[in-house]
Image: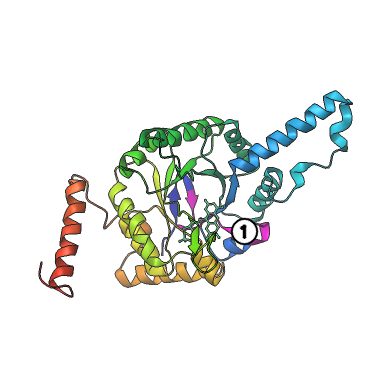
Amino acid sequence: MELSTSYMGLALRNPLVASASPLSRTADGVRRLADAGVGAVVLYSLFEEQLRRQAAQDARLADAGTESFAESLSYFPSVAEQEGGPRPYLSLLERAAAAVDVPVIASLNGVTPGGWVDYARAMQDAGAAAIELNIYYLPGDAHISGRDVEQRHIDVLARVKDAVTVPVAVKLSPYFSSTGEVAVRLDEAGADALVLFNRFLQPDIDPEALAVVSGVGLSNAAEARLPRTWIALLRGRVRASLAATTGVEEPADVARYLLAGADVVMTASALLRHGPEHAAVLLDGLSGWMARKGFAAVDQVRGMLSVPLGTDEAEHERAGYVGAMREANSSAYGPW
Ligand SMILES: Cc1cc2nc3c(=O)[nH]c(=O)nc-3n(C[C@H](O)[C@H](O)[C@H](O)COP(=O)(O)O)c2cc1C
C-alpha cells in the first residue's frame, strides 16, 4: 500500500501526524511516536508569553551586568534552564530531530506580531523541519473588529515567514464570519499549510463549587465534522496544504478526512487516550480499508468527496442543511 505523501513540501512516509500534545514533551516521547509509525511529529507549543518573559529576564540580567561588572552574566544561573522555557525547548527539538527519521515540526503559539516571532528562526536552526504557528486568539474585548482579528493573523504569519526559510503552517480557529476568506488570505500571505482547527480549551463553571474551572478535555469523533466540512470546501481552492486536526479516534476517521481532502491527518486525543502505539492501529486500519476499497495509494483517496470545484459553495452548504432538516423532520420529528 502506498501511503507516502507530501505535506507543505515535506516528504512523509504516511499522512498520519502526531499533533502538538504532551506526548512530545521529551525526546523519548517523540521517539515512541515515530516508532509507532507516524509520518511526522509536531512538538508541543512554545508560547509567546514564555518568550516575552525570557526576553525580559535576559534584558534584566544584561542591565545588571553593565551596571556592575562585565562578566556577571556568566555567574547567573541561567533562567533559560527553567522548566518550559525557550532554551529547553530548543534543546528538546535538537535531540528529537536527531533521534527520529521523520520530520519534527516546532510549534509557536501566540497572537501578536512582536519580536518573539523571530524565535522561529532559532527553531529552524535547532532542526525544525517546519514551523506550526498556532494563533490561539480569543478576542474577549468586544470592541475589536473582525477585520482586526483577521489582520492580526496575517501580520503574525508575515513576521514568521520573514524569519525562516522552512515551511510555515498556520493552525487557526473556525470562529470567523467568513472562515473561507481568512483561509484564502492566509494562503495568499504565504502559509504553506492550514491546520484546521484549533480546539479552544474554554473554562467551565462548577455549580457545586461555585467556581470557574479550567481543564483540558479530550475530543470525541463528532467534533471532526466542522473541520471536515471546511477541508472539503477548501480542497483545490488554496495552494497551501490542508491538515486536519480534531476527532480522529479510529481508522475510519482518518479515511473520512482524506476523502474530504486533507493532505495529512493529525491526532492527539486518541494517542493520549490509548498511548502513542495507537498510531500503528490507525495506520494498519487505514491500509486495511484502502485494500478493501481497492485503493493502492492515498493520492487516489484524497479529496474524492470534497466539494467539487465550480460548485456554488454557499448554495451547496445550504442544500446540505436543508436536506438534513428535511430528513430529520420526515423521520423522528414528523413531516417537514
Ligand atoms: C492535553 C493537550 C495538550 C495540547 N497541547 C497543544 C499545544 O501545545 N499546542 C497546540 O497547538 N495544540 C495543542 N493541543 C491541541 C492538539 O494538538 C489538537 O489540535 C487538538 O487536541 C485536536 O485534535 P484531537 O481531537 O486529535 O485531540 C493539545 C491538546 C491536548 C488534548
Front residue of 293/47: it is 47
For residue 81, say whether it is visible: yes
Residue at the image point whose x is 52% and y is 31% from the top: 159
Q: Is residue 18 above or below residue 167?
A: below
The percent position of residue 276, horizontal first and vertical second, equals 56, 67
Residue reaching furthest to the bottom: 332
Q: Is disc 1's CB within 8 Å of ligand 1?
A: no
Residue numbers of the magenta segment:
11-29
Residue 297, visible in the rendered structure = no
- Image spot of residue 50 (x, y percent): 64, 43
Please name whichever residue, 146 or 106, is drawn nearer the observer in this view of the structure: 146
Secondary structure found at label 1: helix
Q: Is residue 205 magenta?
A: no
Residue 203 horizontal/vertical position (percent): 50, 57
Residue 307 x/y as whole percent: 24, 52
Q: Residue at x 36, y 37 (%)?
A: 146
